Image (spheres, rainbow, N blue to C red):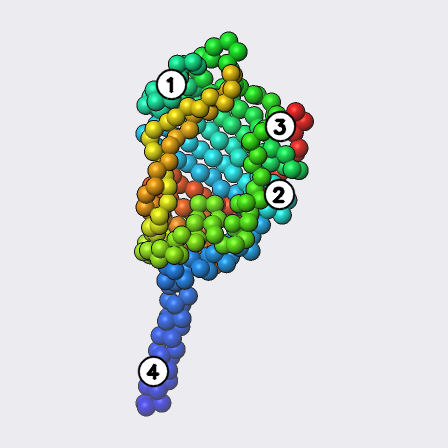
Amino acid sequence: MTGHCSKDRSVVLCLMLISVLVASCNRAPEGVDAFKASQQAAMALDHFHVELVRKTEIGEFKNSQSIDCSATYFYDHEATDLSPKGIESGESQLQGRPSAHHETDTLFVEGKTYSKNTSSWENPTYGSDDAHPDWFVSSMPRDPHEACASIKKGAEFGYVLYDLMIKANDFKYLGKQSINGHECFEYETGFPGKKYSDKMTTTQLGPNSSMSTREMVNTTLHSKVCLGTKDHLPYQVIGEDYTARYDYAAIQKLPVPVP
């Protein structure tokens, strides 16, 4: 009888030990440790893709970006859909009302920046239409060298500002999530930074060209960052007015345009 009890007790203790080990494997690391591990994982990468959706009172802004540091390649497709308030605040005496929908493609490949875009204006006056439906060589460089250098130093990785977040050490664990089939631990973090205001300014770049941008102000930013349970890489970042999702599959590069 004693032998059976001893055996049963051993089985129970073994099961308890297994439960403890499984629980420890699924337990999220402390915030600062999790972000330091993620920082190291990101520093080892040379490419990623991110989809950003930003919603504000003046409209919805979408960016689809790919970067390959090993090939010095960058691509960004930007789509803007302005709200009535955004259209009103971006109105110009010279060109009139801005387009409700606007798209811009920017490509950096083989040492040159190429761009194409739809018109910024609803009804541009004669000679003032800035639409470029075909690729052209842009004078505004988008060389990803600086961004790649920041990644390799561990300063930032897209919308994850490792240096600022780790220095602020303001983390709160929120739970486990599943993003595009990847399990991740989600943390809320606060850190100093800048954000877009709801005020737009229009800058004349030339007689037939202009650019409307939103002003930025200093503030304390708060983000929710989901880090992979296995690879520690970020899979989602939720800011105060945006959501960014990451993918690490091989990038399908666009060919060099022929302007």
Label 2 packing within 10 angstroms: few (<14), some (14-19), many (20+): some
Residue at position x 60%, y 22% from top?
A: 134
Q: Amino acid at mark 4?
A: Arg
Residue behind mark 1: 91
Give the number of the mark in front: 2 or 4: 2
As helix, strand or loop, the secondary structure at mark 1 comes to loop
Label 4 packing within 10 angstroms: few (<14), some (14-19), many (20+): few
**First along the sequence among labels 2 and 4:** 4
Q: Amino acid at mark 2?
A: Thr
**First along the sequence among labels 4 and 3:** 4
As helix, strand or loop, the secondary structure at mark 3 comes to strand
Residues at marks 4 and 1, CA–CA distance in whole angstroms: 78 Å
Q: Amino acid at mark 1?
A: Glu
Q: Residue 41: where, in percent of width, then height?
A: 51, 57
Give the number of the mark in front: 4 or 1: 1
Q: Quadrant of residue 74?
A: top right
Q: Residue 246: where, in percent of width, then height?
A: 48, 45
Query: Which quarter of the rendering shows the C terminus?
Result: top right
Disc assigned to residue 72 = 2
Residue behind mark 4: 9
Q: Residue 45: where, in percent of width, then height?
A: 56, 52
Residue behind mark 3: 137
